[in-house]
Amino acid sequence: MALSRKPHVLVVGGSDSSGGAGIGRDIGTISALGVRTCIAVTAVTVQTHEAVLESHHLPPGLVADQMRAALQANKVAAIKIGMLATEQIIAAVAAVLRENRQIPAVLDPVLASSSGGPLLEADAIGTLTRDLMPLCRLVTPNLVELAVLAGSRPAVDDCEMLRQGQRLLDAGSQALLIKGGHATGPRSTDILVRPRQQPIRFDASRLAGSMRGTGCMLASAIAAHLANGTSLEDTVRKGKLFVFESFQKIEAA
């Protein structure tokens, strides 16, 4: 079919019944940027905008089979990974990435919901950092996620943030976009760090209020631009602008 030959982003993640985050938010974002999607569901959650009520994990083999079928059916030009839930699912996803190293993957390391409910088993962190993150073209942690992944307390300044990022680069990560949305001040600054390169800062005004799913949106927007062959630095710049403008429209509505 002609549609299968157009560039697709394979979205790997969990569902969110509220529609605020998860694969629903991913698909909406990627489609808004003119790129097609295919999916592999890792978990089904029962969520409102305030709480995670239930979470049911799919068998790891089924997750891997979904990914392989999507890759066979479509011209997948990028992979966006969100909620993984368990150590076994992480291992299954990593196995498929190793079979498809030519396809850039963007990992949004979903550890908990916006309301604080855990979405990744605590004993899976080591598998995530050791076996999956080095296979991804970009990992997009916020400050809380960065600290957990680095085994530290949340960074209190840029120097500590960059030290934590360097620890993950030393462990094999290819690139990190450290998101500053959980920081304070009138500006929100994300920092792109890569081995043996100077950090690149992406700065924007901090918008008032809060919106669920911004991490999903940013990683998905970056994956969509990667699927179109955009350079990593430009994908981050365009992705951040997309999220900022989307948030502005919601606030103005």
Image (tube, rainbow, N blue to C red):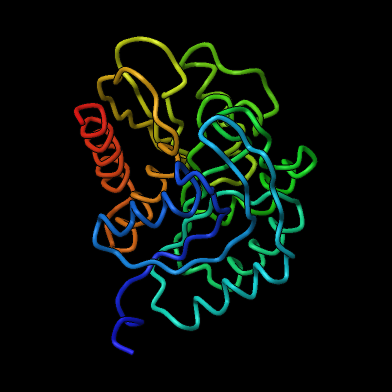
**Is residue 30 depicted above or below 120 in this figure?**
below
The residue at the point 61 percent across, 46 percent down is 172
- Spot occupied by residue 139 in the image (x, y as percentages of width and height): 50, 44
Q: Answer left or right for 48 relative to 121.
A: left
| Left or right position of 180 against 14 | left
Query: Which quarter shows the C terminus?
Result: top left
Q: Residue at x 19, y 27 (%)?
A: 252
| Left or right of residue 122, residue 82 in this image | left
Which sits in the foreground, 132 or 15? 15
Q: Position of residue 81 (x, y in %)?
A: 53, 54
Farthest residue to the bottom: give it: 1
Q: Residue furthest right?
A: 123
Q: Position of residue 248 (x, y in %)?
A: 22, 30
Give the image location of residue 57, x and y in percent: 71, 56
Name the residue at 40% across, 64% down: 9
Work out whether 132 lies above or below 112. Answer: below
Q: Nearer the viewer, residue 36 or 93?
A: 36
The residue sitting at 55% across, 79% down in the picture is 69
User: In this orientation, which residue lies closer to the viewer: 143 or 230?
Assistant: 143
Q: How many marks?
A: 0
Is residue 45 depicted above or below 162 in this figure? below
The N terminus is located in which quarter? bottom left
**Please, is residue 217 above or below residue 146 in the view?**
below
